[in-house]
Image (tube, rainbow, N blue to C red):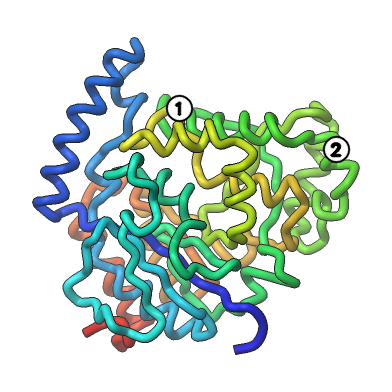
Amino acid sequence: MSGYPIDFVIPWVDGADPAWRTEKARYLAEAEGKADAFSHDTQKKEIDAADDRYRDWDILPYWFRAVEKYAPWVHTIHFVTCGQTPKWMDTKAKGLHLVNHTDFIPGKYLPTFSSHPIELNLHRIPGLAEHFVYFNDDFYLTAPVRRSDFFRNGLPCDMIEEKPPMYPRDELYNYILVNDIVFANAHFSRKEFLKEHRDKWFSFEAPKAALRNLYYSKLDKNYFFGFDIHHLPMAYRKETLRKVWDMDYERLDRTCSHRFRDFRDVSQCVFKYTQLLSGEFAPYDKNRYGRLFKLGDSLDETCRAIETQKYKMICINDTGVTDFEGSKARLIASLDKMLPAKSRFEL
């Protein structure tokens, strides 16, 4: 392997585990009680503990098959759980590091049933390479990828694409999006970014994003108003995560103290925005190589994209699904068509 090592990180939870469900129910009752005392708003808005956030589509083996086939250059896969291990997994497989929440998340934040404390503390994982790619458990490789799809000259590949905020529904995620933008404006100036990193704002590497940025460039010069998030694997340097903790410890500490997603949280986007708004990224057109699919609206299109390998990477988002078992069977059939052979990570 040439150059510096690049690791992959993926979290996972077995939402059907009886012991885990019992513990979740106990802490949820406690959290809902605090939410009632804190605010007059609805509990649904304050805390997100919906079961579909934790349910398992039984497709994780295909994630490992895809990494082995399409990214053989990866140094180590850090598989992050609360101590659970899939029954099919070969825990002694080369290049696999099983990581328990207790191995890297400060004890005062545990146990957690939110992805945010996990994501905000990734840099503390023992042995994690300085350059790593973070995958949600619904992010999948569907075609060969190169190191340069994630890092170039030591910088994470990403794109900055302004997008006016749209909040059509009163849902918790929208509040978190706002909090992330508030963070960005608290630490960075839109006017200064346009002055210092104009080449990245209007990069030819991502022409459609550049045109959109040009269109919106006449809006308020001082404050950022929103970005396209791109729900795809995210390249990070540990240095960035450490920097953000130093910049805004109180905001991250408050988020990590919430055992469930909370409307006062920030997300891992604070790391993304810090990389982007510091100019510490290599321009890369994510829209060309990856896409988010919402299964409730586009199951057939998702399966076609998998089978034809239209994109290098996709997000298989569990949103709006009414026929869970039928959708799962259809999705597994497509993944098995693309990746029928077991990987070294399977027994």
Helix, strand or loop for disc 2: helix
> Can you identify the residue that label 1 sits on?
264
The Cα–Cα distance between marks 2 and 1, rounded to whole angstroms, is 28 Å
x, y percentage for residue 29?
18, 28
Residue 158 placement: quadrant: bottom right
| Residue name at image x 29 percent, y 13 percent | 37
x, y percentage for residue 98?
32, 70
Amino acid type of the residue tagged 1 in the rendering: Arg
Residue 4 placement: quadrant: bottom right
x, y percentage for residue 211?
80, 49
| Front residue of 300 and 234 | 234
Q: Is residue 265 toward the left or the right of residue 184 in the image?
A: left
Amino acid type of the residue tagged 2 in the rendering: Glu
Residue 185 placement: quadrant: top right
Furthest-right residue in this view: 195
> Can you identify the residue that label 2 sits on?
192
